Amino acid sequence: MFATELTANYFTSWYIQNFGCDAYYAHNERLLFDDARERLMGKISEARRMEAGR
């Protein structure tokens, strides 16, 4: 939530883009990992459902 709130505001987004922010990058990396994990788990569930339907 912290990372997404920062990029929702134009001024904080501009600042991070131009000057960086270690805390933002640390939290954003975790969000990206969580999102990728969620997508992968969804694909696994879908594949299992398809396999069970054979």
Image: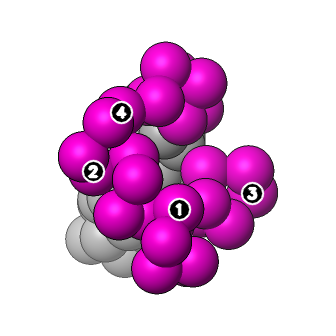
**Above or below, comparing residue 54 to residue 20 in the picture:** below
Image-based side of 8 in relation to 18, left or right: right
Image-based side of 29 in relation to 12, left or right: left
Q: Which residues are magenta?
A: 1-27
Dot placed on the residue nearer the N-terminal end, 3 or 4:
3
Alpha carbons under labels 1 and 2: distance apart: 8 Å
Q: Which residue is mark 3?
A: 1
- Percent of width and height locating residue 38: 50, 51
Q: Amino acid at mark 3?
A: Met
Dot placed on the residue nearer the N-terminal end, 4 or 1:
1
Q: Which residue is mark 2?
A: 17
Q: In which quadrant will I find the N terminus?
A: bottom right
Q: Do residues under tags 3 and 2 come within 8 Å of each other at their CB atoms? A: no
Q: Amino acid at mark 4?
A: Gly
Label 1, residues with CA under 10 Å away: few <14, some 14-19, many ≥20: few
Q: How many marks?
A: 4
Q: Do residues under tags 3 and 1 come within 8 Å of each other at their CB atoms? A: no
Q: Amino acid at mark 1?
A: Thr
Q: Which residue is mark 4?
A: 20
Q: In which quadrant will I find the C terminus?
A: bottom left
Task: Name the mark nearer the viewer: 3 or 2.
Answer: 2
Q: In the image, what residue occupies the spot 49% across and 72% down?
A: 11
**Above or below, comparing residue 15 to residue 11 in the picture:** above
Q: Amino acid at mark 2?
A: Gln
Alpha carbons under labels 3 and 2: distance apart: 18 Å
Q: Do residues under tags 4 and 1 come within 8 Å of each other at their CB atoms? A: no
